[in-house]
Amino acid sequence: MKKFNKYALLLCSLILTFSFILSGCNNVQVDVSSSDNSGNSNKTSSTYNLSKNNKENPKKDSKNNVKEVFKNDLFVHYINVGQGDSELIQYKGKNVLIDAGPNSARNSLLKYLKGAGIKKLDYVVATHPHEDHIGNMDDVIRNFQIGEFIAPKVSSTTATFKSMITALKSKNLRITTAKPGLKISLDKNVNFEFFSPNSASYENLNNYSPVMKLSYGKNSFLFTGDAETLSEKEILSKNFNVKSDVLKFGHHGSSTSSSIAFLRKVNPKIGIISCSKDNKYGHPHKETVKKIKDMNIKTYSTYIDDTIILTSNGTTIKKLNK
């Protein structure tokens, strides 16, 4: 009986998982989440309904149907790690992780990655040595097979950074230096290009963050870590093609990032802010929120929307509803 119950629970779990994915694909309704100028949050809710067939007649080959629907899709997960950053990119069994959030999200991040079926991370990027970006990097390194580890050429004396280096050494992993011109590929059609850091040293560690563009067909996503206006100016002066459909706002929506000049050049249709609710830093800053509203950028935030998952088939970007 116990064995039967175990398999019954597993079957139910699989059915729920596939129903969720199919519902997101069949009826995606985008909602706009942002903050007003006073810092208060407003959210237009979105809902989805399981189709009648999926709800009452789940087919035995639903797993194959799901694979068929998404076989050429790129998935970008902006994981809710509280006051920090972590993004997972998936395409045809290949996986990239950018940052690993703060130490406080240790259990939830590992659970999320394992729940996504991750066993190997083909590329891992640590944008800079701050704890809210590499707080769980040591555990990520120890728990998953790592193909290549990328980070800017900068060190720190913090226990968090030292723990990351110790974990890398335990697996004999070398660090590939993040720099302009570096390119990595998941497929001939799925490529990352690095635009920074452009200087050998910065007073502020945030500016070591590599700004990188992910391109898939006609769609593109820009990741910024905590890069601030100084780094943005350097990138613009180099004439890099930063224009992207989706922008992860720099430094959690801080006023020290996302200059008007940079936003105009990127010209995103969708924006993402990763931060916790009522954080002590005041993220996202009201100046950034005003820019977002003035430029009519459809923006989602992890503190309102929880983990945000965007999909692309190379021509269209959709948000999966939960």
Image (tube, rainbow, N blue to C red):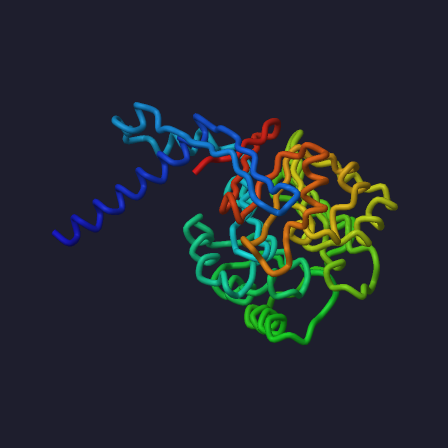
Residue that extends furthest to the right in the rendered view of this protein: 237
On screen, 213 above or below 144?
Answer: above
Report the label total. Answer: 0
Q: Say whether residue 96 is left or right of residue 7.
A: right
Q: Position of residue 217 (x, y in %)?
A: 65, 31
The quarter holding residue 238 reads top right
Question: From what the image shows, is residue 22 above or below residue 140?
Answer: above
Q: Position of residue 240 (x, y in %)?
A: 81, 42
Residue at coordinates 68% horizontally, 54% vertically from top-left? 251
Q: Residue, x 52% and y 34% (percent of image)?
A: 319
Which residue is the extreme one toward the front?
Answer: 38
Q: Quadrant of residue 220?
A: top right
Front-most of 276 and 170? 276
- Which sits in the foreground, 131 or 13? 131
Instruction: Return the residue found at the far top.
Output: 52
Q: Quadrant of the C terminus?
A: top left
In the image: residue 185, left or right of residue 200? left
Residue that appears at 32% across and 30% down: 61
The x and y percentages for residue 44 are 51, 34
Please name whichever residue, 120 or 38, is drawn nearer the observer in this view of the structure: 38
Query: Residue at 58% across / 73% down in the picture?
Result: 163
Judge by depth and name the residue closer to the eye, 36 or 25: 36
Where does the image place residue 64, in percent across and percent down from the top left? 37, 32
